[in-house]
Image: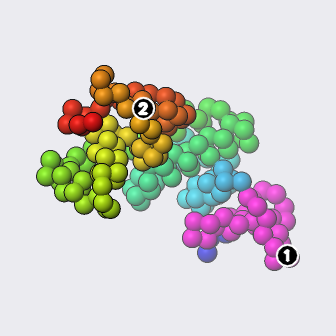
Amino acid sequence: SITAKRMISGLVLKYLNGECFVIRRGYETTLPVSSSFCLTVPFTVFLGRSPDTAVPDDLRAYQLHMADTGVTPSTFNARTVALRFFFSMTCDRDEMKKYMQFRTEPRKLPIVLSVEEVSALLAAAPGPGLKYRAALSIGYGGELRASEVTHLKVRDIDSDRMLIHVERGKGGKDRDVMLSPSFDP
C-alpha cells in the first residue's frame, strides 16, 4: 500500500488499488475525498515529494511515464485536468498549465455488416409477423438509436418523401433521416 501524506495535519491519504481514502489519525473512519485530489496522488507518488515543488520537467516526465505504462487516454486526461486545477487553484502557479498536454482517444471505424449478415439478422427477428423485422430494418437502414426506434410512430414515417422524422432524439433534438430505398411500405 502506498501512503501519501497531505499537507493538512492529522490526515493521512491512502491510495490502494486505484481507490483513494482519507483516514484521520487515531480514528478508523474514512472521510470523503474529492476526485481531483485523488487524481493528483499518483503524481505525488511518482515524484516522491510534495507535488507543489514540481517543475515543468517533472510534469513532462510524469506524462511520459503515464504513456509508457499504458494509462488509458481518459485516465490520462482526468489526471491532467486534476493537475491543472491543483497548480492553478491550489498553488497559484498558472504557468504550469502550459506544460501539460492532453491525449486523444483513437477513433475506431464502425463495423459494417455485409448484405448477407443484415439479411440473416433480419430473418432471425423473433416472433410472428413483421413488427420486430420492420423495427430492425428501419433502425438499421436509417442509422437510428434503439431508443429512437422504440419511440417511432407510424406518422413519423413519410414514405412519399422517403424520410423518417425522429422526435426528441439524442440531446432532446428532432431530426429527419433518410428512409432506406429498400423499405417497402
Crowding at mark 1 (Cα within 10 Å: few <14, some 14-19, many 20+): few
**Observer able to see residue 101:** no
Question: For the point 56% across and 49% down, which residue is it?
Answer: 79
Task: Identify the residue shown where x is 84% and y is 61%.
Answer: 9
- Position of 50 relative to 144 (above/below): below
Quadrant where the C terminus is found in the figure: top left
Task: Residue 78 in the image: state x and y as whole percent.
Answer: 55, 48
Q: Residue at x 65, y 32 (%)?
A: 94
Tag shown at residue 27: 1
Is residue 19 a member of the stretch shown in magenta?
Answer: yes
In front: mark 1 or mark 2? 2
The residue under label 2 is which amino acid type? Asp
SS of the residue at dot 2? helix
Q: Does residue 127 belong to the magenta stretch?
A: no
The stretch of residues the image draws in magenta is 4-33
- Is label 1 in a helix, a strand or a loop? loop
Q: Which residue is mark 2?
A: 156
